[in-house]
Image: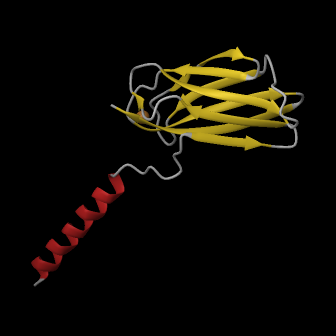
Amino acid sequence: MKAISLTLLLLLLIVAGVFYLLPDNSGISAKTDYSNEAVRISVTSNQEAAVAMSENSFTLQLTDAAGQPIRQANLKVQLLMPKMYCGIIMAQVSEQTPGSYLIKGIPVMQGKWNAEISLRIADQLIRVDHPFIVKS
Ligand SMILES: [Cu+2]
């Protein structure tokens, strides 16, 4: 009897472990929006799922509260995996058209990533996280 309950307990642990390890895609959408009284930021993944060890890109639209594009913004973007220590990857940011910025970077492994956007404007530092999934 004791052996059976021990086996059951082990089975339960294994099942729970499998569910724990399944990728959690909650909170992942192709687009992240942020706004405050001064700016509106919208970030879009340019691919449905990013691919590890290859260049992936995002488009960031930046306007003021009136909807006018903000040019030559002081934007920094880094790619990283929350709760992991596999590195912080600096992304390249370039303005394509007024207020529209292309972000390019190379995530190094599969899983759940964040594009961490820092915008310095006037005396504010605005931080926005755009979550995305990387496939192998
Ligand atoms: Cu990692």
Q: Indicate left or right for 10 with 45 as reference.
A: left
Q: Quarter-wise, where is residue 135 in the image?
A: top left
What residue is drawn where x is 68% and y is 42%?
A: 33
Quadrant location of the N terminus in the rendered image: bottom left
Residue placed most toward the observer, 67 or 93: 67
Classify residue 23 as left or right of residue 100.
left
- Displayed quadrant of residue 74: top right
**Picture quadrant of ligand 1:** top left
The structure residue drawn at horizontal position 53% and vertical position 45%, both measured from the top left corner, is 29
- Whether 15 is drawn above or below 98: the answer is below
Where is residue 83 shown, x and y percent of the image? 49, 43
Q: Residue 50: percent from the left, percent from the top?
A: 43, 30
Query: Is 92 situated left or right of 86 in this image?
Result: right
Q: Total of numbered circles in the picture?
A: 0
User: Which residue is outermost to the bottom?
Assistant: 1
Coloring applied to the structure? secondary structure
Looking at the image, residue 38 lies above or below residue 102: below
Q: Nearer the viewer, residue 26 or 68?
A: 68
- Please state which of residues 116 and 96 is positioned toward the viewer in this rendering: 96
Above or below: residue 4 compared with residue 125 = below
Question: x%, y% of residue 7?
Answer: 14, 72
Q: Is residue 32 above or below residue 9?
A: above
Image coordinates of residue 21 in percent, x first then y, are 33, 52
Which quadrant: the C terminus?
top left
Q: Quadrant of residue 124?
A: top right
Which residue is found at the position 82% from the left and 36% from the top?
Answer: 39
